[in-house]
Amino acid sequence: MDLGRLVSEMREWRRHLHAHPEFGFEERQTSAFIAAKLREFGLDDVAEGVGGTGVVGTLKRGNDNRSIALRADMDALRIPEQSGLPYASRNPGIMHACGHDGHTAMLLSAARMLAEEGGFDGTVRFVFQPAEEWGKGALAMIDDGIMRRSLSKRSTASTTCPAFRSATSRPVPVRSCPPRIISRSSWAASAVTQRDPIAATKCSSQPVRL
Ligand SMILES: [Zn+2]
């Protein structure tokens, strides 16, 4: 894969998303953009409208029944943009001020690379979550059955926000590992001063205490 080309595409996607921010559960253009890209990459399945405006792409290679979920959030904040940049928000009063445009572009890049190069045996789910900023989107996707759909043994969350209130804050039906996570909500970037949620992604047959 031409990484230079992928980086320039990722920048283009990020700037497109930055120019067209949408608030939580209103990410219709964003999710349509994501779904179109995933289909273009040749994923095996693309589900839209998961938990409202969420998107889940599925990529299978080989025969192994193991799976992993990679997740990004995609909503913006009600903040007017004053940057003056050529790709500044075109939606008055709304801005990608928390980096979800970057998260989405990074996950799209991972989907593109894995779809093109493979190199794994199992299933990868690409989870694009709505409404992270007000803490409703993850639960909406869970209530819509995403954990039953994905059957993922591990999931990772990427966020630059202090408002880390992901599904790991309560027991969820993740198969095998970890069976239970006991902790307070915290932010991975402040793991030195708070509990480290990244430790929750480690596989263990025992309850994980953070
Ligand atoms: Zn955020």
Image: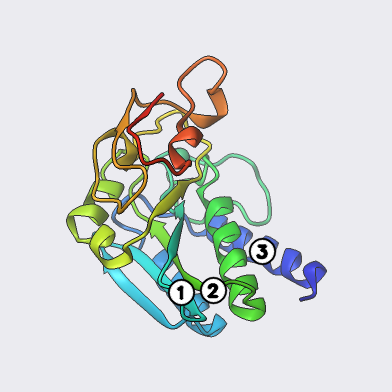
**Residue 64 has which mark?**
1
Amino acid type at image mark 1: Asp
Q: Name the residue under label 2.
A: 121
Amino acid type of the residue that numbered disc 2 sits on in the rendered structure? Asp
Q: What element carries label 3?
A: helix
Q: Position of residue 18 (x, y in %)?
A: 56, 54
Q: Which residue is drawn at 49% across and 33% down?
A: 199
Q: How crowded is mark 1: few (under 14 residues within 10 Å), some or many (20 or more)?
A: few
Does residue 28 show up? no
- Give the labeled residue for mark 3: 10
Q: Quadrant of ligand 1?
A: top left
The tag earlier along the polypeptide, 3 or 1, is: 3
Q: As rendered, which of 21 and 69 lies closer to the eye? A: 69
- Please tell me which residue is depicted at 40% across the width and 67% down the height of the picture: 31
Q: Position of residue 111 (x, y in %)?
A: 56, 69
Image quadrant occupied by the C terminus? top left
